Image (cartoon, helix red, strand yellow):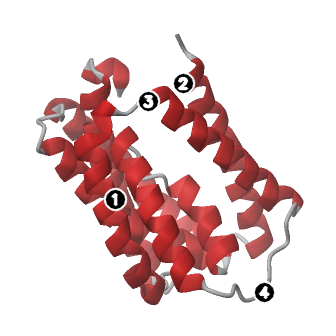
Amino acid sequence: MLLASGSTAAAAGTNIAVSAVTALVGGVGHARAGRVDWRIVAWMAPPSVVGAFLGGFFGSSLPDRALLAAIAIVLVYSGLELLLGLRPGPERPRSPRATAAGSGALIGLLGGAVGLILGTLRLPALVKGVGLGAHTAVGTNLVVGFFLGVFGFLGHLARLEVEWVVLGVSVAAAVPGAWLGSRLTGRLSELALRRAIGVTLLVVAAVIGLGAARP
């Protein structure tokens, strides 16, 4: 996105719009399969969209490297936690609704600022903090990510930070992948899906960390 858009702000605005569309496609597939916890969506989505709009509107004034480095650190810890069980949590978290709302607001703010819906950051919050099963966490994550992406995009759009040609091409390429991914999720066991999420978090953390370290 950075290469195609030519500026960090335009890349962020364009990328979060693409993410919103793909999250919608994947979220619909998971909702049809019953893998969405709508009560958690109701608690997590509103603070997420407020944070996303504020992050998208004011994000250009924040240091990109610091934000990306912080995200990478959290992803590394979360990925290792899922893979190795560093901190086995309680079977029933004490305040899942408060965790959903608080993490939604923070992740929304970060996501709007850097142009990502940060599903990889929200997944461990849903699994460990809220207590959802991996399958339901994936579907719920995408639905919340859609709302976050829409409002983050609106924040960037208000500042005219969108590359429309790149947006159109990217959406056309990403939608089939999102549809296929939503169909494949239900075929994995809970353990296999948790491991896949953990590996994904570590890979994304490496990519984001390299981006933050670039001169």
The answer to whether the residues at label 3 and label 4 have Cβ atoms under 8 Å apart is: no
How far apart in space, not on screen, are marks 3 and 1 (Cα)? 17 Å
How far apart in space, not on screen, are marks 3 and 4 (Cα)? 36 Å
Decide which of 179, 37 is in the foreground and name it. 37
Q: Can you see residue 9?
A: yes
Q: Nearer the viewer, mark 2 or mark 3?
A: 3
Q: Is residue 186 left or right of residue 93?
A: left
Q: Secondary structure at mark 2?
A: helix
* Mark 2: amino acid: Gly
Q: Which residue is mark 4?
A: 91
The disc label shown at residue 64, or none: 3
Label 1 vs 2, first from the N-terminus: 1
Residue located 42% across and 29% down the image? 63
Q: Secondary structure at mark 4?
A: loop
How far apart in space, not on screen, are marks 1 and 2 (Cα)? 23 Å
| Residue 158 x, y percent position in the rendering | 11, 44
The answer to whether the residues at label 1 and label 2 have Cβ atoms under 8 Å apart is: no
| Residue 96 x, y percent position in the rendering | 59, 83
| Residue 102 x, y percent position in the rendering | 49, 70
Residue located 78% across and 61% down the image? 82
Label 3 vs 4, first from the N-terminus: 3
Label 2 vs 3, first from the N-terminus: 3
Crowd rating for badge 3 (residues with CA inside 10 Å; few <14, some 14–19, many 20+)? some
Residue located 29% across and 63% down the image? 50
Q: Which residue is mark 2?
A: 211
The disc label shown at residue 189, or none: none
Crowd rating for badge 4 (residues with CA inside 10 Å; few <14, some 14–19, many 20+)? few
Q: Is residue 121 left or right of residue 45?
A: right
Q: Nearer the viewer, mark 1 or mark 2?
A: 1
Label 2 vs 4, first from the N-terminus: 4
The disc label shown at residue 51, or none: 1
